[in-house]
Image (cartoon, rainbow, N blue to C red):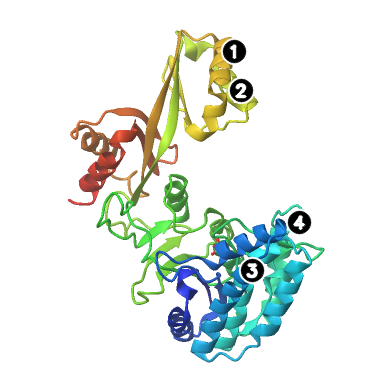
Amino acid sequence: MIVAKFGGTSLADSSQFRKVREIVLSDRRRRFVIPSAPGKRSSGDEKITDLLISVSRLAAANEPFGALLERIFSRFRSIADELGISVSLDEEFAQIEKRIRAHAEDAYIVSRGEYLNGKLLSAYLGYDFLDAAELVVFSPDGALQEEETYARIAQALKARDTAVIPGFYGADENGVIHTFSRGGSDISGALVAHAVNADLYENWTDVTGFRMADPRIVQDAMFIDSLTYRELRELSYMGATVLHEDAVFPVHKSGIPTNIRNTNNPKHPGTMITASAGIENVHHTITGIAGQKGFTIIHIEKDMMNSELGFGRRVLQAFEEHGVSFEHLPTGIDTMSVVVRDRELKPHQEEIVARIIELVQPDQITVEEHLALIATVGRGMVRVFGTAARLFTAISTRGISIRTIDQGSSELSIIVGVDESDFENAVQAIYDTFVRI
Ligand code: ASP
């Protein structure tokens, strides 16, 4: 059985709805479907969720929101009309408007895009509609109650052949609606997949899968046909985004593969993400490259550092005291470097440096800003001799100097730090060396 989640652009208008129906009904195993709210129909368009957020702001400020709400409703109405879906939306609209006027919680308002889209899609597919408010359980402070959620979904779907469950939201024991963070329908889909022990979790979107590098840097970057959840984690941590980060845990845990597919190109097999993937289908030594700008590195030097007990702990204590988490910790015998995101460090930089000096009395401490980190990720890298050498050569032959190196203990990734101005060039160099061979 397959759980299929469709993103906002996949359900942005009636022609997208048609594609979705064709996809769902073409495979009887696609029994449970999770929709997002209608997204952009073209690049200048607005997402329904963004419009609903505006409604909730207006309502909170006691400003008129009726016209905006009507614009939202009319998008649903036109989808229903164009497809000839017979569902009584007017009652739903009246109910929603009434609750907003009675000061409904923000999450209720913001989640109505998924709710209404779920109503439409269920009628269009001839699938049952189940309200996520009954199935996805949050605590009153907004934390997902995972086990309770699995139990409710499993119970509700046990006796059903097919169902549509809106993504993005759930409710607490008092019936108050809560949402995940933006893009959270991915999480809803993964929860349903786990709860029903699906064979496959399909995530239908508007791209044909993950690319080996950001196409804004490497225009023709190849698609990744398969990768593991751990590789995905390394890549998304460094900024590759296709799936919501938290959509991984429910399916990874139960070993259910996630298939990223393109609603606009349904014949393409997309990217398959699995708990463990063999080496046999690794076409290149590396699986992908991802990176980000905006890091600072603090270098600390002290003679005989390595024999000073508790040195590292005290350095990190300075960060911890200011609530700043670090990203990487490359160390040498008498040197230690701490890589931190600029936005975390900046407000506390001076105090942290002063505190490190106080705590460990280094011989030297320097702060280097404008660093970009690039992660080269691949389960195939361990097996291939000389991967690191090739990587460093690729970068240095372009005249780029590497300012820091960190090879994760998993040997799944090698992270290098370069000047922000060298970032794009370094990514291209790595891609050219490992992929364009
Ligand atoms: N509609 C929500 C958003 O725009 C959730 C989602 O699409 O997954 O973030």
Residue 139: which numbered mark, if any? 4
Query: Does 40 appear above or below 338?
Result: below
Q: Earlier in the sequence, mark 4 or mark 1?
A: 4
Q: Are marks 2 and 1 in contact (CB under 8 Å)?
A: yes
Q: Earlier in the sequence, mark 2 or mark 1?
A: 2
Q: Residue at x 32, y 45 (%)?
A: 381
Residue 164 in view of the camera: no
Residue 359: which numbered mark, if any? 1
Q: Earlier in the sequence, mark 1 or mark 3?
A: 3
Q: Nearer the viewer, residue 37 or 1?
A: 37
Q: Quadrant of the N terminus?
A: bottom right
**How much space separates mark 2 and mark 3, taking CA atoms?**
41 Å
Q: Nearer the viewer, residue 56 or 308?
A: 56
Residue 335 in view of the camera: yes
Q: Nearer the viewer, residue 48 or 65?
A: 65
Q: Residues within 10 Å of mark 2 (few under 14, many from 20)?
A: some
Q: Note whether ligand 1 is within 8 Å of mark 1.
A: no
Q: Locate residue 323: give its quadrant.
A: top right
The amino acid type of the residue labelled 4 equals Ser
**How much space separates mark 4 and mark 1, taking CA atoms?**
41 Å
**How much space separates mark 2 and mark 4, taking CA atoms?**
32 Å
- For mark 3, what is the residue? 195
Q: Residues within 10 Å of mark 1 (few under 14, many from 20)?
A: some
Q: Are marks 4 and 1 in contact (CB under 8 Å)?
A: no
Say whether residue 166 is left or right of residue 133.
Answer: left
State which mark lies toward you, 2 or 4. Answer: 4
Q: Earlier in the sequence, mark 2 or mark 3?
A: 3
Q: Are marks 1 and 3 in contact (CB under 8 Å)?
A: no
Say whether residue 384 is left or right of residue 144.
Answer: left
- For mark 2, what is the residue? 317
